[in-house]
Amino acid sequence: MIADFEYFAPKTVEKALSLVSQYKEEAKIIAGGQSMLIIMKQGLLTPEYLIDIKGIAALDYIKYDEGKGLRIGALTIHRAIEKSPVIQKHFGVLSETERNLATTQTRNWGTIGGNLCHGDPAGDPAPVLIALKAKLKLASLGRERTIEVEEFSKDYLEVALEPDEMLIEIQVPIPPPHTGAAYEKLMVMKGDMGIVGAAVSITLSPGNGVCKDARIALSNCASIPLRAKEAEQVLVGKTINDSLLTKAGEVAAAETNPPVDVHGSAEYRREMVKVFVKRVARIALERAKVG
Ligand SMILES: Cc1cc2nc3c(=O)[nH]c(=O)nc-3n(C[C@H](O)[C@H](O)[C@H](O)COP(=O)(O)OP(=O)(O)OC[C@H]3O[C@@H](n4cnc5c(N)ncnc54)[C@H](O)[C@@H]3O)c2cc1C
């Protein structure tokens, strides 16, 4: 059963920000409700005020600019990202990720902003956005700031949002030439949360094919989406081959602190990280060669 609450449905960002600023910790934002309602039904959150932002049309957009990159409004649903021609063309890894996220029903109602603010380390978009060096625009009344997606998660279901702040926009820069990115997760069934997942972005030097930059981020391997920085260094400055990819997988596995649940032990998850980092990095590498 859900405890009683007072309900607001602001139609502008300003009105929503003034409500969160007024009620702060006593209020919770709800967007698509795909995670929030579960938590409320479980009694884990019993907000006195519920601020339903789903009707703020101004935060539902996908914009692409060759200079500024990709901008996604916080209230954009997963399905819109999956189906967006501009994202399919320029950030294919994002639409691929969305295709395996939950069911079509959840993708049709859940928002990218809600997914990130929920702070589930098993979530798919965060590691991909970390690999793509994305930033988040957060706003409170009269103030805006940006934060790297990498810095946003603080702990399990805990993110760097102040009580009077909202996520407004996801900003993804244009990757340099010769960059390839990929994401895959281990699923029991298509659309399940990943048992583990790996996102990899690789940039090659144009002349000699040496790895100029690499980003590796993992889902469900720690209490936050985890950037495997030591594994990245295995690749940077080298001509990538299969044995280096194996090494990167091993180093990434050693960086994890995986959860233990019915789907797998920590040891099993570490073994799967080795497999997935190698597999996904190989795809990213092939894409970088033609990128
Ligand atoms: C059956 C099922 C399967 C799923 N499978 C997957 C999966 O495979 N991969 C995956 O990544 N996720 C999965 N999810 C999670 C799903 O993607 C998220 O629940 C959804 O995207 C959350 O978006 P929402 O709009 O519903 O957020 P809500 O549930 O409305 O909100 C979630 C949290 O974010 C906060 N919030 C929302 N919007 C904002 C904002 N703009 N600013 C500040 N705070 C905000 C809320 O206060 C709340 O704390 C699954 C969910 C379900 C129900």
Image (cartoon, grey):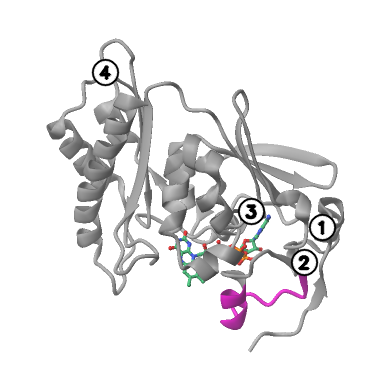
Residue type, label 2: Ile
Queried on whether the Cβ of the residue with tag 3 lies below 8 angstroms from ligand 1, the answer reads no
Q: Which residue is mark 3?
A: 76
Q: Pinpoint residue 164: horizontal percent, then vertical percent.
A: 76, 54
The residue pinned by badge 2 equals 51
165 versus 149 height, above or below: below
**48 in the magenta segment:** yes
- The question of residue 256 being in magenta is answered with no
Point out the tag, 4 or 3, that comes first from the N-terminus: 3
Q: Amino acid at mark 1?
A: Ala
Look at the numbered discs 1 and 2 and tell me whether their residues touch, using CB distance below 8 Å.
yes
Q: Which residue is mark 1?
A: 16
Q: Which residue is mark 4?
A: 210
Q: Which residues are magenta?
A: 37-50
Q: Position of residue 88 (x, y in %)?
A: 48, 42
Cα–Cα span, label 2 and label 3: 17 Å
The structure residue drawn at horizontal position 49% and vertical position 60%, both measured from the top left corner, is 120
Give the quarter of the figure containing the N terminus: bottom right
Mark 3 or 1: in front is 3
The residue tagged with tag 3: helix, strand or loop? loop
Q: CA distance from mark 4 to mark 3?
A: 37 Å
Task: Name the residue type under label 4.
Answer: Val
Q: Is residue 262 visible?
A: yes
**Residue depth check, mark 4 versus mark 3: number of the one nearer the observer:** 3
